[in-house]
Image (cartoon, rainbow, N blue to C red):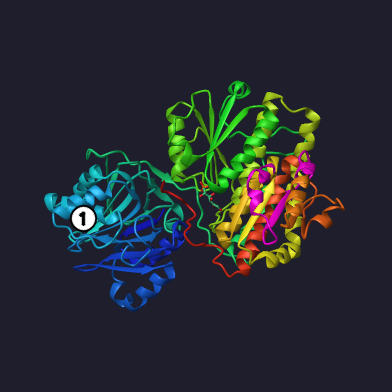
């Protein structure tokens, strides 16, 4: 993770860097820092914790540093070394003349550290990055050329990196390079911006160049030189970013997470526009570029994702198998990439990712692509690295999600799977016409059902207050809502730090039931349908072990009142669409518990929104 920014031009750099870092705070908030080129020296300022601490650190120095027109900045999510001031970026060589920021992981940093220490370099931090600062400095000592020093150093580095480097000998030059980590250069009039992601630069320019792996760009205010790893100049592919600057506002909500939960009905409405006009009309999904015959004959799909996106993928498997009868495997990207997978040119591989930058998923889809599979990407970021690998790109258009805990992007991913599964079913003719029409009717009603849930959250808040001080939480479900149990538990643990686990209810008796007693809340996702009665029995079994029972249900079954201490009611819905409805009260429950506990809801500890390291 981590985010980097840089600027070289004619304008005061401090605010450009700080504003850019603010836009990248979703990538980490363990520490931040900037390095600024002044007349004869480079000044480095760092602070532990959130960006506000760096702003405060800089305040007393403003008059001294305002004249600087070149600098680099960093926001850290700690990988190597604790989140301390010493480990904060930028890092420097021993004389302080060479300064750099880094996003990624240097895998051979120990070897580099030993080699450089033997040459006399003194290491001050525990980071992998500091080894790169010393390495580039040692190459600079030999070559007296910053671009060449970066190029030679890059050849000795193993792992993932985006680097932005400056040297005190250069009044107005930044050198940047990358491998397996995102980096783009924004192009202004007599100025260049560097950033890990678009939001950091979009306020200033829409013209940008996405660096390819192993390319090196040397930026001076009026020129960019782009070379490959052999030092040969390469053409510059300048793009117009399809973005408008957005003022990120909580719109009166206390947290972005709550605002994003409440945006879900509109997100779903927007997704349906242009794709489903009426229940008796076909689904339009021009984004799928597989030809119809190939689609009809597909017999294997693999879906790869992480975290919340993995839970959406699990629902996707259920849908595609139910509607289309095609076998689907779902796998965590981090597991997929380190085993011998049976993926080939006849497999459709679907990557799901809010950010489109998650390192594990990106690596997994690159591996699948190399095996000849058609790659379909479902993402909220059509400008991301994953989108650039896609043969078919299905954007979910949930809008920027600021809160680290994914909410609206999850429901948007579910919608993408509903559309995809039904679109494929229409091509295959695997669902009867009358059933298809009723499914589409239901799909069009989903936004107003979620509106109904959001219109009155009193019961959820009451339940949150009742369970806020619990240490553990168990979520049970069966069938298509097992992923809902996993996602509900993930939401709770990531923002409240309560130990929460989702189980397929039938598995309780194979071990987890041993944990149940009068202190353990068990939340049963009891949606009407094929497994309702079975789940009810499993809930009885938990109740018989004195667990504190909560139901999330669309059933008016009178016997629930005796069985459950709290009941969260949701509108009635066909079983196959129930994950989209059931998740909303669970997002709210997690939110209100965390809020009640006074947790940092939007930026929970140890997490970052975009996980660009393996
Ligand atoms: C949880 C959450 C994470 C992400 C995961 C994958 O709320 O947001 O679990 O889902 O890091 O990220 P993407 O979807 O960007 O690939």
- Which residue occupies the foreground of this view, 547 or 236? 547
Furthest toward the bottom, the residue is 60
Can I make out residue 120 in this image?
Answer: yes
Q: Is 371 above or below relative to 39? A: above
- Confirm if mark 1 falls within 8 A of ligand 1: no
Please state if 78 lies on the left or on the right of 136 as rendered.
right
Residue 510 in magenta?
yes
Please state if 60 lies on the left or on the right of 273 as rendered.
left
Which of the 4 image quarters holds residue 41? Answer: bottom left
| Residue to which mark 1 is pinned | 134
Furthest toward the right, the residue is 558
- Residue 253 x %, y %: 63, 66
Q: Is 239 above or below relative to 79? A: above
- Which residue occupies the foreground of this view, 540 or 610? 540
Q: Is 549 above or below relative to 338? A: below
- Residue 49 x %, y %: 42, 67
Can I make out residue 266 in this image?
Answer: no
Please state if 353 lies on the left or on the right of 487 as rendered.
left
Which of the 4 image quarters holds residue 48? Answer: bottom left
Residue 597 in magenta?
no
- Residue 7 x %, y %: 33, 59
* Count of marks overlaid on the render: 1
- Residue drawn where x is 56% and y is 27% of the image: 290
Q: Which residues are drawn in magenta?
A: 506-535
Q: Is 483 above or below relative to 74? A: above
- Residue 582 x %, y %: 71, 50
Q: Residues within 10 Å of mark 1 (few under 14, many from 20)?
A: many
Q: Is disc 1 placed on a helix, strand or loop?
A: helix
- Residue drawn where x is 87% and y is 53% of the image: 558
- Residue drawn where x is 86% and y is 50% of the image: 557
């Amino acid at each position: 993770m981590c985010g980097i920014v840089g600027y070289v031009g004619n304008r005061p750099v401090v605010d450009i860097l700080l504003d850019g870092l603010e836009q990248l705070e979703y990538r980490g908030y363990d520490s931040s820092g900037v390095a600024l080129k002044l007349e004869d020296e480079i000044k480095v300022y760092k602070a532990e914790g959130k960006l506000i601490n760096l702003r405060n650190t800089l305040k007393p120095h403003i008059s001294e540093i305002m004249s600087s027109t070149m600098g680099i900045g960093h926001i850290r999510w700690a990988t190597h070394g604790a989140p301390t001031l010493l480990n904060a970026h930028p890092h420097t060589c021993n004389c302080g003349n060479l300064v750099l920021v880094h996003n990624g992981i240097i895998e051979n940093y120990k070897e580099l550290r030993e080699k450089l220490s033997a040459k006399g370099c003194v290491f001050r931090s525990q980071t992998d990055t500091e080894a790169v600062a010393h390495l580039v400095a040692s190459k600079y000592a030999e070559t007296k050329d910053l671009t060449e020093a970066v190029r030679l150093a890059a050849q000795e580095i193993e792992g993932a990196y985006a680097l932005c480097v400056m040297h005190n000998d250069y009044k107005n030059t930044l050198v940047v390079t990358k491998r397996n980590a995102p980096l783009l250069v924004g192009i202004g009039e007599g100025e260049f911006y560097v950033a890990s992601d678009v939001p950091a630069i979009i306020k200033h320019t829409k013209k940008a160049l996405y660096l390819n792996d192993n390319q090196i760009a040397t930026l001076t205010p009026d020129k960019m030189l782009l070379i490959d790893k052999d030092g040969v100049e390469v053409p510059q592919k300048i793009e117009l970013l399809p973005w408008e600057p957005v003022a990120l506002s909580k719109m009166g909500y206390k947290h972005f997470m709550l605002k994003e939960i409440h945006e879900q009905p509109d997100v779903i409405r927007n997704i349906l526009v242009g794709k489903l006009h009426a229940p008796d009309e076909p689904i339009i999904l021009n984004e799928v570029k597989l030809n119809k015959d190939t689609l009809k004959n597909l017999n294997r799909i693999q879906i790869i994702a992480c975290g919340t996106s993995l839970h959406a993928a699990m629902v996707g498997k259920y849908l595609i198998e139910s509607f289309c009868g095609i076998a689907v495997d779902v796998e965590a990207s981090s597991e997929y990439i380190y085993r011998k997978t049976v993926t080939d040119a006849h497999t459709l591989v679907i990557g799901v990712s809010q950010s489109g930058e998650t390192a594990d998923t990106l690596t997994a889809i690159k591996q699948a692509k190399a095996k000849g599979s058609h790659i379909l990407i479902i993402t909220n970021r059509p400008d991301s690295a994953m989108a650039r690998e896609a043969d078919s790109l299905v954007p979910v258009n949930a809008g920027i999600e600021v809160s680290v805990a994914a909410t609206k992007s999850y429901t948007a991913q579910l919608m993408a799977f509903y559309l995809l599964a039904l679109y494929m079913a229409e091509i295959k003719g695997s669902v009867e016409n009358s059933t298809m029409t009723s499914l589409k009717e239901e799909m069009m009603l989903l936004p107003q059902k979620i509106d109904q849930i959001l219109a009155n959250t009193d019961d959820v808040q009451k339940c949150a207050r009742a369970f806020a001080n619990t240490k553990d939480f168990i979520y049970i479900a069966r069938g298509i809502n097992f992923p809902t149990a996993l996602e509900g538990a993930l939401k709770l643990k990531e923002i409240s730090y309560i130990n929460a686990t989702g189980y397929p209810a039938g598995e309780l008796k194979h071990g987890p039931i041993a944990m149940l007693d009068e202190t353990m809340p068990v939340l049963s996702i009891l949606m009407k349908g094929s497994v309702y009665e079975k789940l009810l029995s499993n809930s009885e079994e938990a109740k018989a072990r004195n667990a504190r029972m909560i139901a999330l249900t669309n059933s008016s079954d009178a016997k629930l009142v005796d069985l459950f201490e709290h009941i969260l009611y949701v509108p009635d819905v066909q079983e196959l669409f129930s994950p989209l409805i059931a998740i909303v009260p669970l997002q709210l429950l997690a939110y209100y518990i965390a809020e009640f506990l006074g947790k940092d809801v939007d930026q929970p500890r140890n997490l970052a929104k975009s996980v660009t390291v393996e």
